[in-house]
Image (cartoon, helix red, strand yellow):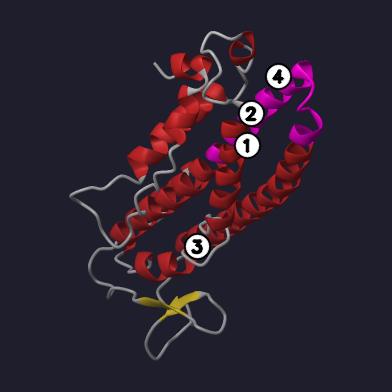
């Protein structure tokens, strides 16, 4: 976002002499192109504007690559954890470690959800700045394309999170005493970051009186709070 912001500042402000550059989403290529008779010829676009759009495309590709790689990794790790839970059911020592691993894993996935939401919000903001600076109308067609990108499609990630939460409920039964040694041993690297990410997600995706076509939908309630209440250390870290 910072690099894109720097690129925007290098663009000369629209003096009002140039007509607004209306863009649309090309249905064949998926690219954002100029609408009208001169579609795609780039007339009126400065080198700085071209540099900005090229960097925007590069960043979008980075978002997608990172997100898809993480999803593929999480599918494998979830299966491994499920297998480990089944193998460790008769060993308290192994179960303590697995509990910590599951909490860590859940935290990583929540942070990836946060990554998706923050990147989407960042794109909306930077495109708004670009439109204001250049007089272009690129935000709407570009966001149409963003909505089709892998990093925005979090359905699979949400499913993995739900399966992980089911494991948490299984390995942290409600009958367990809050002050048990096992519960106190689940403190992890991702604990505080997870709580912060959840709060950020709720803030970013909460209902608002200023909701627009570019707003993210509200965060789905998944009962996670009840799961965290089974883990006293996490509850304490959230205060």
Question: Splitting the image into 4 quarters, where does residue 138 fall?
Answer: bottom left
Of residue 121 and residue 70, the one placed in the foreground of this image is 70
* CA neighbours of label 4 inside 10 A, class few (<14), some (14 to 19), many (20+): some
Residue 171: which numbered mark, if any? 2
**Considering only order in the chain, which callout, 2 or 3, is on the residue closer to the N terminus?**
3
Q: Is residue 97 magenta?
A: yes
Q: Marks 1 and 2, Cα distance to the nearest angstrom? A: 6 Å
| Outermost residue toward the bottom in this view | 37
Q: Give the residue drawn at x 39%, y 47%.
A: 219
Residue behind mark 4? 96
In primary-sequence order, the first of circles 3 and 1 is 3
Nearest to the observer: residue 12 or residue 230: 230
Q: Is label 1 in contact with label 2 (beta carbons under 8 Å)?
A: yes
- Magenta stretch bounds: 84-110
User: Could you tell me how far apart the alpha carbons at marks 1 and 4 are, in whole angstroms?
Assistant: 13 Å
Query: Left or right: 151 with respect to 9?
Result: right
Q: Residue at x 45, y 62 (%)?
A: 49
Residue ID for mark 3: 53
């Amino acid at each position: 976002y910072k690099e894109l912001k720097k690129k925007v500042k290098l663009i000369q402000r629209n003096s009002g002499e140039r007509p607004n550059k209306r863009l649309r989403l090309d249905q064949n290529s998926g690219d954002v192109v100029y609408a009208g008779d001169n579609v795609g010829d780039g007339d009126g676009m400065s080198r700085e504007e071209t540099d900005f759009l090229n960097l925007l495309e590069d960043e979008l590709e980075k978002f997608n690559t990172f997100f898809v790689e993480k999803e593929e990794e999480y599918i494998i790790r979830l299966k491994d954890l499920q297998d480990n839970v089944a193998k460790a059911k008769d060993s308290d020592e192994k179960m303590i470690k697995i509990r910590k691993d599951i909490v860590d894993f859940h935290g990583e996935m929540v942070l990836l959800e946060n990554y998706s939401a923050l990147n989407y919000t960042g794109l909306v903001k930077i495109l708004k700045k670009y439109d204001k600076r250049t007089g272009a109308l690129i935000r709407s067609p570009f966001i149409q394309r963003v909505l089709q990108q892998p990093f925005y499609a979090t359905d699979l990630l949400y499913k993995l999170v739900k399966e992980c939460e089911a494991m948490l409920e299984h390995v942290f039964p409600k009958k367990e005493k809050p002050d048990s040694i096992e519960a106190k041993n689940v403190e992890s690297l991702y604990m505080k970051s997870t709580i912060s990410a959840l709060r950020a997600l709720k803030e970013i995706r909460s209902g608002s009186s200023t909701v627009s076509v570019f707003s993210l939908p509200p965060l789905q309630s998944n009962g996670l709070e009840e799961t965290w209440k089974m883990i006293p250390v996490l509850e304490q870290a959230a205060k």
